[in-house]
Amino acid sequence: MSQSPRLEVRNLSVRYQTRGGEVHAVNQVSFDVFPNEVFGIAGESGCGKSTLIRALMRLLPENGVSDADLIQYEGQSLDRMSEKKFREQVLWSKIALVPQSAMNSLNPVYRVGDQIIEAIRNHTSQEKHEARSRVEELFDVVGLESDLMDSYPHEFSGGMRQRAMIAMSLALDPGLIIMDEPTTGLDVLVQERILRRIREIRSHIASSIILITHDIAVIAEMSDRIAVMYGGRIMEQAQSEDLFDTPCHPYTLGLKNAFPSIQKLGQELVSIPGSPPSLLGKQTGCPFEARCPFSIDQCVTEIPKIESLGKNHEVFCFRNTDAPQMREQATSMSTWHSSN
Amino acid sequence: MALLELKDVTRHYEVKTGLIDRVFRGKPIRKIKAVESLNMVLNENEVVGIAGESGCGKSTTCMIIAGLLQPSSGEVLYQGKRVDQFNTQDQRWYRHQVQMIFQDPYESLNPRFRIFDTVAEGPRALRLWPESEIASKVESMLGSVGLEPGKYGDRYPHELSGGERQRVVIASALVMEPRMVIADEPLSMLDVSIRAGILELLKDLAKKRHFSCLYVSHDLSILGHIADRLMIMYLGQAVEIGPTTEVIQKPQHPYTKALISAVPVPDPRIKRGIPKISGDITRPIDPPPGCRFTPRCPYANHTCSENFLKLDSVQKTNHLAACHRLDVVSHESEMTSMV
């Protein structure tokens, strides 16, 4: 890709201080988001995807500390910017967030339209009626009737609330929208409609989108590029077609084969034995090692390096050269459950 | 032989209207028609999936079958006997025969019970076997759900992961040696990488232990992997029933078609069609007498809003759809597939 990235993140780490010790929630995460692309981050609960976003948006709780070599938005460094400047100049106007459980993020005692108007007026010098007509426009973009502006959140269904939150995130024309599990907990048909809206927004408004979800099918459908996270690290990162055609990391292989598809009834599904690692204390090896059927001694004692396989395809695995064999073996349940 | 049969099962809930509204303003009592004239059969050793969006009545159906709710009208027959006419002894027997697996493994386990006692609770409560036999059955059950009894028996729920907890929930249902298991979204709280393990476990145990299963989920991809037959519900009405592969590959009802085309596929190269559906799902409060999908259906005409076609499927192979306009719907999809 010759374009310069809209967001550049290099070696971002986040640690939480807890009574039990230091939790290394995100480790050495690097990625770029290019203009007008959907960058998907896939991962299961506890993989650090939400912490990563909180660190980017400076929403970490008090016991969380983040540290990065570089976080840049269109060439402007964000990690050294003061809190105040970040809130005034970046938040909402350049980077907007649609939080997880966006459905419960609206204030129940304010009218939905007024909440968005307030957000706009806090950040710009617009008059109330200007802001109001802007909200009308936004409601149209996300497919809500404009007379719903004067309704309260409880009068909205889950899908409508989610669309209202997306409308709010679009209010100041941000160049990057981060959506954390935007369709989790919604019914299939509602999810379908929201995903379609997100695609339309991307093509009309030229925003970049970071889409975070555990749903492999949603991410496959929406993303141009995908990063797979596990144990606080990015395991594999590639163009979405490449990631699904030639996955190289054992975890990606497992996830891909674990997900049932409505178009492949009767296909054998695998499950990955064990459970996600505790992130307490410093990692000494690959976090996936304990659940990986292909692990070797090196995986326990040494942290793998990120290897580039060309075409923006990066993988965090010592055995990346054995990927073709692993890919074949990983489709069978016995591979995953015989080794331990 | 049919293990379970539902005949015209209907369940209405009354929406509370205040006394003043009722007496002085004359507002009528409104009814939510959660399940309407449902007919279905669950045969021996069969897994039937019920799919639909939230509010379609799938959980109410489960509760009625489990005997936790009474139907407003209609009959639930278990091995030919009416469930609502059971005496105390029959009820004990029914509670032994029919078990439920709940959605949330984090809330359906008592935090103060050790795993062994959790699983032994059911047989102990119904005094099914002497204590020594219960102990051996519990241990073998824990083993067959993949939890080593020596290692897990003395632990408490908080020491287990979500997947392990769901295995405990399955073990405590199956230790009763049920003939029928009702599973209400048993995977939705679990991580993707371990879902397949629980799904395969349930499938495998259903074969080995010869029980029938009613599997309720909104996720058609998962139902496609476990169910022999599939029933699709919309706002309390069954709209389509048939063998799973047929329903998924050749859906007939316009709602089923829309639902299936909305399921995302884990392959970036596959582009789905746009579901032919308009508007949003409503609540079934005082609905019109006809097909409840009418307001959102692109094919509907006046017959649809006046008459409701009940599905009445007894045979396993039958693929039925409750739609007046099937000829138009299928004709159009043939036309589009030719283009």
Image (cartoon, helix red, strand yellow):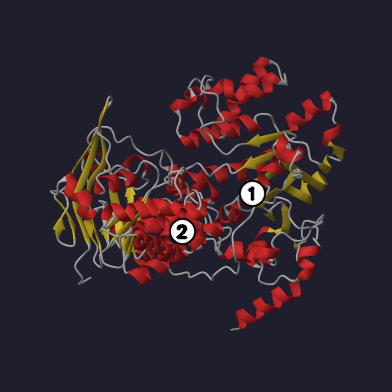
In the image, residue B212 lies at what x, y percent? 71, 43
Query: What is the x, y in percent for residue A336?
Result: 43, 46
- Which subunit holds the residue at mark 1? B
Q: Which residue is mark 1?
A: B55
In the rendered image, the vertical position of residue B288 relative to residue B8, given as above or below: below
Q: CA distance from mark 1 to mark 2?
A: 24 Å
Between B117 and A157, which is closer to the camera in this rendering?
Answer: A157
Pinpoint residue A170: horizontal percent, then vertical percent: 35, 60
Q: Can residue A249 be seen at all in this image of the molecule?
A: no
Left or right placement of residue A62 versus residue A140 in this view: left
- Amino acid at pointer 1: Gly
Q: Residue at coordinates 43% horizontally, 44% vertically from top-left?
A: A107
Which residue was labeled with disc 2? A217
Residue B160 higher or lower than B205, as above or below: above
- Does residue A121 show up? yes
SS for callout 2: helix
Q: Say which residue appears at 54% left-offset and 70% top-offset.
A: B274
Mark whose residue sits in front, 1 or 2 = 1
User: Are labels 1 and 2 on one chain?
Assistant: no
- Quarter of the picture containing the C terminus of chain B is bottom right
Q: Amino acid at mark 2?
A: Ala
Q: How many marks?
A: 2
Q: Nearer the viewer, residue A36 or B109?
A: A36
Callout 2: residue from which chain? Answer: A
Q: Which mark is residue A251?
A: none
* Residue neighbourhood size for the residue with mark 1, other residues' Cα within 10 Å, grouped as few (<14), some (14–19), many (≥20): some
Q: Which residue sits furthest top?
A: B131
- Residue at 29% across / 55% down in the picture? A92
Q: Secondary structure at mark 1?
A: loop
